[in-house]
């Protein structure tokens, strides 16, 4: 029998790490999509992929690994964030669509 102090929390209950507050306890771990361009830019397919997961109820989404140096690409479709051009395509993910 669970006591009040040890009762498991529901996934739908709020969570947070000060000052971050989440609507629930569902966190999506990072998964490589390989949807990036050969230049390392994010595509509309990336934006749709992450938007679908957010609509599915995940309160926090940890994105896939991204290249932080031009000399560190591990495959052709890896996303890059080492210059302002590549960062601008990823910053569009946070803009709401549909």
Image (tube, rainbow, N blue to C red):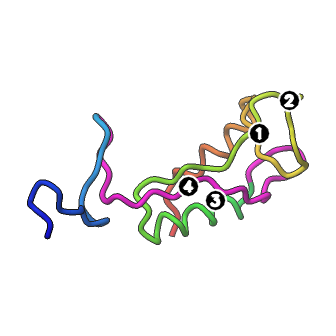
Which circle's residue, 1 or 2, is located before the other in the chain?
2
Please give left or right for residue 52 compared with residue 83 in the image.
left
Q: Give the number of the mark in front: 1 or 4.
A: 4
The one nearer the camera, 77 or 2, is: 2
Please give the name of the residue rendered at 86% of the width and 29% of the height, measured from the top-left corner: 70
Residue on which the image places disc 1: 80
Q: Main secondary structure of the magenta part?
A: loop
What separation in Å lies between label 3 and label 1 (alpha carbons)?
15 Å
> How far is the residue under mark 3 from the one under mark 2?
22 Å
Residue that carries the numbered disc 4 in the rendered image: 29
Q: Nearer the viewer, mark 3 or mark 4?
A: 4
Read off the magenta span: 19-42
68 in relation to 43, above or below: above
For the N terminus, the quadrant is bottom left
Could you tell which of marks 1 and 4 lies nearer the N-terminus? 4
Residue wearing tag 2 = 70
Mark number, residue 47: 3
Q: Which residue is drawn at 66% across and 49% down?
A: 64
Q: Say which label, 3 or 2, has the lower sequence index.
A: 3
Task: Classify mark 1: helix, strand or loop.
Answer: loop
- Dot 2: element: loop
Disc nearer the start of the sequence (3/4) = 4
Instruction: Mark 1 and mark 2 in contact? Answer it, CB < 8 Å.
Output: yes
Q: Which residue lies furthest to the left in this view?
A: 4
For residue 22: magenta?
yes
Q: Decide: few, some or many residues near mark 2? Use Cα within 10 Å; few <14, some 14-19, many ≥20.
A: few
Question: Is label 1 in contact with label 4 (beta carbons under 8 Å)?
Answer: no
* Position of residue 57 measured from the top left corner of the image (x, y, whole percent): 41, 68
């Amino acid at each position: 029998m669970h006591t009040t102090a040890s009762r498991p929390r529901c996934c739908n209950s709020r969570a947070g790490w000060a000052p971050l507050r989440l609507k629930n306890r569902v966190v999506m771990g990072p998964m490589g999509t390989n949807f990036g361009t050969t230049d390392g830019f994010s595509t509309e397919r990336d934006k749709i992929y992450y938007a679908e997961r957010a609509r599915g109820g995940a309160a926090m989404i940890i994105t896939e690994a991204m290249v932080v140096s031009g000399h560190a690409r591990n495959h052709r479709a890896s996303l890059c964030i080492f210059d302002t051009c590549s960062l601008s395509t990823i910053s569009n993910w946070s803009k709401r669509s549909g």
